[in-house]
Amino acid sequence: PPHAQSAARLDTADQTALLLVAEGKATFGSPSGEGEADEQPERIRELPDFYMDETEITVASYQRCVNDGFCASAFFTSWSSDLARQHCNYGALGREQHPMNCISPKGAENFCAWRAAQDSRYRFRLPTEDEWEKAARGTDGRRYIWGDEPEGIGGCRAHTKRCGANSTAAVKSVVLDQSPYAIFDLAGNVSEWVIVEQGASDLAPGGKHSFTTRGSNWTRDGALRVADRDATPVPLGDTGENAADVGFRCVANAR
């Protein structure tokens, strides 16, 4: 639908909300002399309307997909390392509102596909890098979710190691980690699976594309700039042993 008719909020079968990121132009990447080479050149691109999850997908939301028989749980229940048992949230008592971590990008895509099966009006999938970046920085080209000044000016603004994190936190725990679209935790808590558009021929779940992650997380001190990109990734297997610092969220487009 045209932007003027798009609702500001989309409620889902797993009792969460996606918020509208309105169509229009935005700045992506970093100017020369700032950041890493893979962030350049800075560019302006127009994106259509899309909706993005207000928070990272929680364990509680993922459990509803498991209960429906659509999402898998078997590969989360028998951990082979103390690290995984300590930091992977699925099945951990009291972490129902923590982000769903220790999940492969294909597992994350499967959850988004379940969403689509619940609501035929929308296509649900993982966000692209540009969709994630626009949702994080808005349309004014800011360097950080909260503006242009580094985190040290004004104290801790994301759930990261620098601010004392030693595991994940419940979503929306850090009020200052909120984008111009009122989307939470894009700077911290867990990094998030996104789709690399370059070379992709199909963005739908299971389509031909590769993945990377965006955003900082509870194991890192930095990487808070919204344009920061991870190195070329190797998608994790479904055992998720090394993904305690990675989660995901979905986007939706009208059919």
Image (spheres, grey):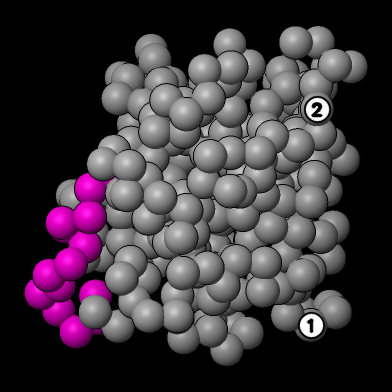
Residue 2 position in % (x across, y down):
81, 10
Return the residue found at the far bottom: 164
Which amino acid type is shown beneath numbered disc 2? Ala
Which amino acid type is shown beneath numbered disc 1? Gly
Q: Residue 155: which disc?
A: 1
Instruction: Please name whichever residue, 175 or 59, is drawn nearer the observer in this view of the structure.
Output: 59
Q: Residue at x 29, y 38 (%)?
A: 70
Tag 2 residue: 7
Q: Quadrant of the C terminus?
A: top right
The residue stretch that appears in magenta? 71-84
Residue 21 position in % (x across, y down):
75, 33
Residue 132 visible somewhere in the drawing: no
Q: Tell me if 202 is positioned left or right of 221 in this view.
A: left
Instruction: Please name whichever residue, 169 or 31, is drawn nearer the observer in this view of the structure.
Output: 169
Q: Dot 1: what SS?
A: loop
Residue 61 position in % (x across, y down):
47, 53
Label 2 vs 1, first from the N-terminus:
2
Task: Based on the picture, tell me whether residue 247 belongs to the magenta stretch.
Answer: no
Question: Which of the two discs, 2 and 1, sits closer to the camera?
Answer: 2
Q: Is residue 105 above or below residue 91?
A: above
Q: Residue at x 69, y 34 (%)?
A: 10
To which quarter of the image does residue 39 belong? top right
Q: Residue at x 60, y 66 (%)?
A: 171
What separation in Å lies between label 2 and label 1 (alpha carbons)? 34 Å
Residue 181 visible somewhere in the drawing: yes
